[in-house]
Image (cartoon, rainbow, N blue to C red):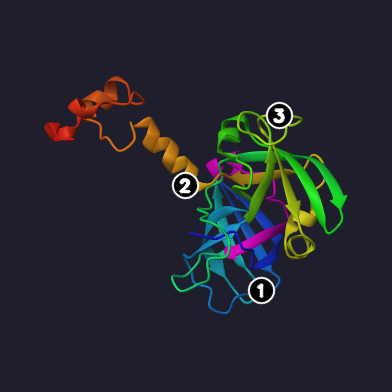
Amino acid sequence: MFTGIIEQVGRIARTEHHSGHLTVTIQPAGMWPDLQLGESIAVGGACLTVTGWDEAGFTVDLSRETLAKTAPHWRAGASVNLERAMTAGARFGGHIVSGHVDGVAEVLRVEAQPGAHTMTLRAPPHLARYLVPKGSVTADGVSLTVVDVGGPAGSRRDLRADEFTLWLVPHTLAVTTLRTWVPGTRVNLEADQLAKYVERLLAFGGSKGLRVEESKKDPLRPLDSSTLDGGQS
């Protein structure tokens, strides 16, 4: 698990195509001396496993599924945000981030404001329902606060239901790759984990359980207490 607080920015030094996957060599700004083989690192928001390392950098393998579902950051010379998995005693500065990218968003507008930059993004349509004003979202691995959204229960009528805005302060721009965003940039997006769990719970009828045979008939139909396993409410 991650928090979306970027530790450093790395550079992709090399990519190697293999049968069915891509091996990427990443050089952090400062190599971690205690990095372990097999540990998880969020690279541009995608949770990846360290498959090798030396004094200069580390390698990760990307499957075809990861390549198909993430933004096209995986090229030599590209900069990527890096965060190691959080430890139990660490400060929780962002929000719950799994590193499982839900979709790719597109930057529509970048506007300089006094003390900040305003970014307008368009999310994939299936993620629009998870975007709420002052809620959380992860973009290229960075934990950010959604400012405005369009559509039902949105806060701006001039935005589409799948559009939202972010206000980025100078520090965020200075320590992440977000300073390179321009209109047309594609970014990895992860919706709030809690929102997805709530949606799944409601789809199963709130706190009521489902019989296996009932779920096969209509897995999204809420059931009343008479359908609970054991017949108890």
Q: Is residue 177 left or right of residue 198?
A: right
Q: Which of the two residues, 183 or 143, is positioned nearer the viewer here? A: 143
> Secondary structure under badge 3?
loop
Q: Which amino acid lies under the numbered mark 1 shown in the image of this protein?
A: Ala
The x and y percentages for residue 95 are 54, 57
- Nearest to N terminus: mark 2 or mark 3: 3
The x and y percentages for residue 187 are 69, 45
- Nearest to N terminus: mark 2 or mark 1: 1
Q: CA distance from mark 2 to mark 3?
A: 23 Å
Q: Is residue 117 above or below residue 158?
A: below
Q: Which residue is mark 3?
A: 160
The reply to whether the magenta stretch includes residue 146 is no
Q: Which amino acid lies under the numbered mark 3 shown in the image of this protein?
A: Arg
Would you identify the image quadrant in which residue 178 lies? bottom right
Of circles 1 and 3, the one toward us is 3
Decide if residue 140 is in sight here.
Answer: no
Q: Residues within 10 Å of mark 2 (few under 14, many from 20)?
A: few
Of circles 2 and 1, the one toward us is 2
Labelled disc at residue 56: 1
Decide if residue 196 is in sight here.
Answer: yes
- Nearest to N terminus: mark 1 or mark 3: 1
The reply to whether the magenta stretch includes residue 66 is yes
Q: Residues within 10 Å of mark 3 (few under 14, many from 20)?
A: some
Q: Which of the two residues, 161 or 153, is positioned nearer the viewer here? A: 153
Q: Which residue is mark 2?
A: 194
Residue positioned 60% across, 43% down in the render: 67
Q: CA distance from mark 2 to mark 1?
A: 37 Å
State the extent of the magenta-drawn residues as a range: 64-83
Name the residue at the left extreme: 230
> Secondary structure under badge 2?
helix
Q: Is residue 7 left or right of residue 226?
A: right
Given contact means CB atoms under 8 Å apart, are the residues at marks 1 and 3 in contact?
no
